[in-house]
Image (tube, grey):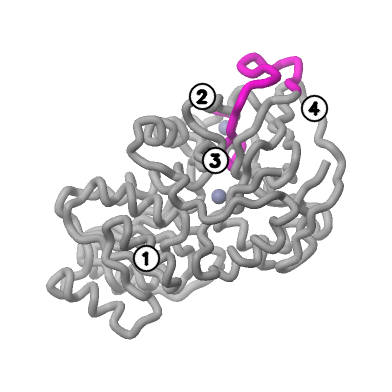
Amino acid sequence: MRAAVYHGARDVRIEKVEDPRIEHASDVIVKTITTSMCGSDLYTYGGEADPLVVLGRTTLGHEICAEVVEAGDGVRRFVVGDRVTFPYSVSCGSCFLCRVGQTAHCETSKGAMFGAGVAFGDLGGSQAEFVRVPLADDNLEHVPGHIDDVSALFLSCNLPAAIIAVDAASIEAMDTVAVIGCGPTGLLALALARQRTRGPILAFDTVPSRLAAAADRGAQAVDAGGSDALSAVAEATAGRGVDKVIEFAGRGSAFDLALSIARPGAVISGGGVYLEMEHPVSLLDMYRKNLQIRLNGSANAKAAQWKAMQLISSGVIDPTSVISHEVTLDELPSAAAAFADRENGFLKMAIRP
Ligand SMILES: [Zn+2]
Ligand SMILES: [Zn+2]
């Protein structure tokens, strides 16, 4: 089959690799209908996760809508032809951490993730024609017929992550909210937050098209790189800072911004991925402000998938609104570069192998 193989920083090639096959009775093989590239894939793509992968062998991607083409003898819930999706991380549903909702830290799968390299179970990625899904009865979900192939791929990661971050922010009806990072997941979180407060939402990014997309969703767009970024918050909050911060840029500098614009007693809800092993923050400032910091970058997507389906089904949110490009697998390498460079106008791609 053909798959996106990681060869080194900014070097992804579409190559022939071995077809996945059933290895355990609980496995299912699926054929990819649509997949995509997540913001978290950019850490791998950019070379920041090289110690975790095998150059020239690790395949990428963890978002999918797919069709079951083969099921192991032990699989009960799925048959050939079923249209399905999986969360980016593999969970068993019955270990202690799965039972307390920490499905991203499943003790059975040891936190395995699709397309994330040897350090995370060495599973194949979704940017491929076929994928082996372990523990299929616990991991796969049927996609309801009225959810289209592109909407469905948001069930793997982006929409559950947005739901979890917005829920963790505990937004009240008149709260002033800041959303940092207006990429695909940040914009989904913004759309959900917009439905929870009638107060102002300030949206921070540096890319003009992303700021415009935030404004379209009812936010006051703030150029995070501009000199008046902090004064925009001061103006909107009488100098106090915002009630709730949702952080989806996933960098230490974005976390610093979150700390600086949060009012005393604020909630900072982080959905971004942080790879900084060490990053200086002022514990004094954090304690003085009585901040509540709730990080869910290791999003327990499995636990939020059902809610994500309900939100799409009921029309509360249309995740396809953040799709800017539809490409084939062969077009992925050039599209990945545009995504990584945050090219103006590029937001998220749907890939049809
Ligand atoms: Zn993701
Ligand atoms: Zn588990």
The number of numbered badges drawn on the structure is 4
223, above or below 176, in the image = below
State the residue position of label 1. Answer: 212
- What label sits on residue 145 in the rendered view? 2
Residue 277 in picture, x, y percent from top left: 56, 67
Magenta-drawn stretch contains 301: no
Q: Earlier in the sequence, mark 2 or mark 3?
A: 2
* Amino acid marked by disc 3: Val
Q: CA distance from mark 1 to mark 3?
A: 23 Å
- Res 259 → quadrant: bottom left
Residues drawn in magenta: 70-93
- What label sits on residue 22 in the rendered view? 4
**Is residue 106 left or right of 71 when viewed as pictured?**
left
**Is residue 323 left or right of 328 when viewed as pictured?**
left
Residue 217 in picture, x, y percent from top left: 31, 55
Q: Foreground: 274 or 196?
A: 196
Q: Foreground: 288 or 57?
A: 57
State the residue position of label 3. Answer: 150
Q: Nearer the viewer, mark 1 or mark 4?
A: 1
* Amino acid marked by disc 1: Ala
